[in-house]
């Protein structure tokens, strides 16, 4: 069976390393929705050895830190579901009190329209955020 995360990056590529990559997902209403994707096809986090698990979580931490430092979100959501795409990837999503779904999960029903001005303000900060993220990810040592 074809895997969309093996066949393509899965979104706007922000950074690619030997073991994993970070992409910005195109999710309407969530301008700072990132995924840390393990490059090799493995379905579960426990398929990785201890060093690879640490490397993966270090990358997730860098993405979370970038969101917190550059956007000051209300909350950062982390999830590794894989129900639809059984290829190891972590969702790292900046959440704001004004977003259309907050405080509910991003996959819940919208509670209000998402305000275009606030979304645009977040998007305007992404280049600086992603530059910082790239430098930090490049410093991580792959196992």
Image (cartoon, helix red, strand yellow):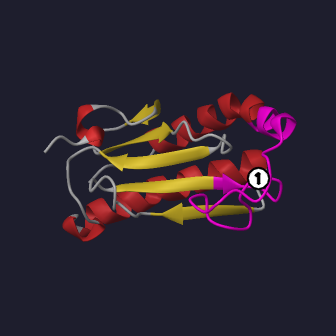
Question: Picture coordinates of residue 75 (x, y %)?
Answer: 71, 63
> In this picture, is 52 found above or below 122?
below
Point out the stretch of residues depicted in magenta. 94-122
Residue at 20% in and 56% down: 42
Element at badge 1? loop
Q: Majority secondary structure of the magenta segment?
A: loop
Residue 133 within the segment the image draws in magenta: no
The reply to whether the magenta stretch includes residue 109 is yes
Name the residue: 68% across, 34% down.
126
Query: What residue occupies the far right of the structure in this picture?
Result: 117
Please name whichever residue, 63 or 73, is drawn nearer the observer in this view of the structure. Answer: 73
Whether 23 is drawn above or below 84: the answer is above
Residue at figure coordinates x 67%, y 37% from the top left: 129
Question: Within the image, what quadrant is residue 53 found in?
Answer: bottom left
Q: Residue drawn at (29%, 66%), measured in percent from left and top?
A: 45
Q: What residue does disc 1 label?
A: 99
Outermost left residue: 1
If the image is split into quadrants, where does the N terminus sit?
Answer: top left
């Amino acid at each position: 069976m074809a895997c969309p995360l093996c066949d393509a990056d899965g979104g706007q590529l922000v950074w690619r390393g030997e073991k994993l990559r970070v992409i910005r997902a195109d999710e309407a209403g969530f301008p700072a929705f990132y995924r840390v994707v393990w490059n090799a096809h493995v379905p579960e986090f426990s398929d990785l050895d201890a060093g690879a698990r640490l490397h993966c979580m270090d990358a997730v931490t860098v993405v979370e830190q970038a969101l917190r430092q550059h956007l000051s979100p209300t909350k950062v959501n982390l999830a590794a579901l894989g129900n639809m795409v059984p290829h190891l990837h972590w969702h790292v999503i900046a959440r704001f009190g004004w977003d259309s779904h907050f405080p509910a999960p991003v996959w819940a029903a919208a509670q209000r329209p998402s305000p275009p001005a606030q979304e645009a303000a977040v998007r305007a900060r992404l280049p600086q955020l992603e530059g910082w993220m790239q430098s930090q990810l490049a410093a991580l040592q792959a196992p």
